[in-house]
Amino acid sequence: MNGKSMATQPAAAEAPRSGTTPVLEVRDISKNFEAVRALDGVSVAVHPGEVLGLVGDNGAGKSTLIKIISGVYQPDEGEILMDGRTLAMSTPHEARERGIETVYQHLALVNQLRVDGNLYLGREPNRFGFLGDLFQILDTPLMKAKTKEVMARLHIRIPGLESEPVHRMSGGQRQAAAIARAVHWGSKLLLLDEPTAALGAEQSAEVQRIIRRTCDSGIPAIVISHNLEHVFQVCDRIVVLRLGRKVLDCRADATSPDEVVAYITGSRGAVGHA
């Protein structure tokens, strides 16, 4: 514990970045699955260039919240705002069109394709105008060039980038490729589900550096993780969900791993109920 009293605990208050409009904000979001209330009045905001860690035990509501933000689910109550304006999304495609990209734990990469093929999967550009569209002539040089650009911007180095299929790459390289794809298309917000799961220490550190570089460029990220060490290494702010409710929302440097665990397990009180 960090020794702060419950009366002065900064975790019991929101921790916004002063002077900035949130890139994305969810207000009083609730979601029911028949008799189960998966989310109960959750409000969260993420600001430009911020890495927000979303943590909690299994069944806390983390995945449900991410799926609402990414358009998979629609909330039963509450609203979503982007840049201060109400946002309505009914499909993941609509979320992607608005610049919200999700990297799920399974990565959704096609093993037989190179990185550039995965980067443009489902969004492949064609060459030669009408004839290219008619005969599906892919603009492979453009895809390779743009892939090299985004990799260079994120300082990602993958041997065999232009020749090897992703199934020949390490877990860290595959995760880096998935993040690069999200960065390339996600102009507003990245959602990362367990980005360092099943990775070794060196690969995890590199993935964290990529996340940090991305957000330093102004694109914020929400990171779901069970690894509190990694959360404290990469995140600016931490939100804890417990049984569908937000119980902690504060800057990472204003709390500690022990305190976060206390909120996850329920031995500390909820936001607004300290």
Image (cartoon, rainbow, N blue to C red):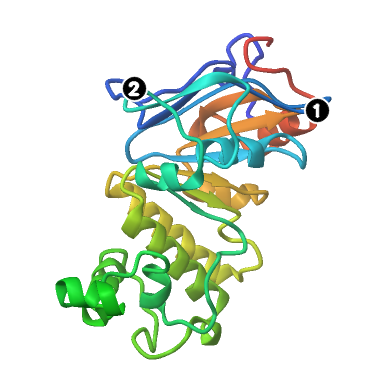
Is residue 28 something one can see in this rendering? no
Q: Quadrant of residue 20?
A: top left
Residue situated furthest right in the rendering = 35
Q: Is residue 166 above or below residue 54?
A: below
Point out residue 75 in the picture as x, y percentages from the top left corner.
60, 26
Label 1 packing within 10 angstroms: few (<14), some (14-19), many (20+): few
Q: Nearer the viewer, mark 2 or mark 1?
A: 1
The residue depicted at 79 percent of the width and 32 percent of the height is 265
Q: In the figure, is residue 161 to the left or right of 173? A: left
- The one nearer the camera, 180 or 134, is 134
Point out residue 241 in the picture as x, y percentages from the top left corner.
67, 30
Q: In the figure, is residue 188 to the left or right of 37? A: left
- The one nearer the camera, 257 or 227, is 227
- The one nearer the camera, 186 or 45, is 186
Give the number of the disc on residue 118: none
Viewport quadrant of the C terminus = top right
Label 2 packing within 10 angstroms: few (<14), some (14-19), many (20+): few
Viewport quadrant of the N terminus = top right
Amino acid beneath label 2: Arg
Residue ID for mark 2: 85
Tag 1 or tag 2, which sits nearer the N-term? Answer: 1
Give the alpha-carbon distance from disc 2 to disc 1, as whole Å: 30 Å
The residue tagged with tag 2: helix, strand or loop? strand
The residue depicted at 46 percent of the width and 22 percent of the height is 15
Residue situated furthest left in the rendering = 128
Point out residue 50 in the picture as x, y percentages from the top left corner.
39, 39
Give the number of the disc on residue 34: 1
